[in-house]
Image (cartoon, helix red, strand yellow):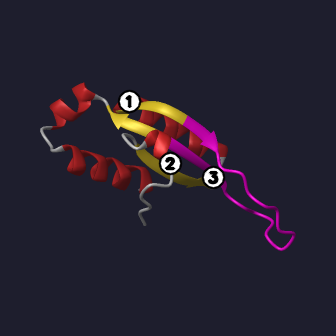
Amino acid sequence: FAGYGIYPEYRDQYAFHVFYDSSEARVKTEAFLDRHFDVVNLSRIPIRKNPRITDEPLIWRYFVNPLPTKLQDSQLDERTFVARCVININD
């Protein structure tokens, strides 16, 4: 899903919203992001607690730019590079 214009202060960055099942998954994903992107900002997305949901995921947002060296080394255009990184994160 995509949303446009919801973070005007980060209009030049990609916004990733990531749902985690564990803290370990978050650590691994953030290591991947740090290797491939300049993380401009990150924060936990606040949620409203619902007593019927007992195992809610950790939800974080990241505002990122591809690292120029990684993008160049990939020999991909920026859009394809970001898409492949998203696929890698989702695996």
Coordinates of residue 85 in the picture (x, y in percent): 33, 47
Coordinates of residue 58 in the picture (x, y in percent): 67, 52
Q: Kindly state the secondary structure of the residue where label 3 is placed.
A: strand
Residue 76 lies in the magenta stretch: no
Name which residue lies at 37% across and 52% down. Answer: 86
Question: Can you name the residue that lies furthest to the right here?
Answer: 51
Relative placement, left or right, of 39 versus 21 is: left
At label 2, the amino acid type is Tyr
**Other residues around mark 2 within 10 Å, as few (<14) / some (14–19) / many (≥20):** few
Identify the residue position indicated by label 3 in the image: 59
Taking 18 as reference, is 41 above or below it? Answer: above
Q: CA distance from mark 2 to mark 1?
A: 24 Å
Name which residue lies at 22% across and 43% down. Answer: 78
Q: Nearer the viewer, mark 2 or mark 1?
A: 2
At label 3, the amino acid type is Ile
**Other residues around mark 1 within 10 Å, as few (<14) / some (14–19) / many (≥20):** few
Q: Nearer the viewer, residue 85 or 78?
A: 78
Q: Nearer the viewer, residue 4 or 27?
A: 4
Asked whether disc 2 touches disc 1, contact meaning CB atoms under 8 Å apart, the reply is: no
Task: Report how many numbered discs are placed on residues in the image.
Answer: 3
Q: CA distance from mark 3 to mark 2?
A: 17 Å
Q: CA distance from mark 3 to mark 1?
A: 21 Å
Name which residue lies at 82% across and 62% down. Answer: 49
Coordinates of residue 76 in the picture (x, y in percent): 15, 43
Asked whether disc 3 touches disc 1, contact meaning CB atoms under 8 Å apart, the reply is: no
The magenta-colored residue range is: 42-62
Magenta-drawn stretch, dominant element (helix, strand or loop): loop
Identify the residue position indicated by label 2 in the image: 7
Name the N-terminal-most of marks 3 and 2.
2
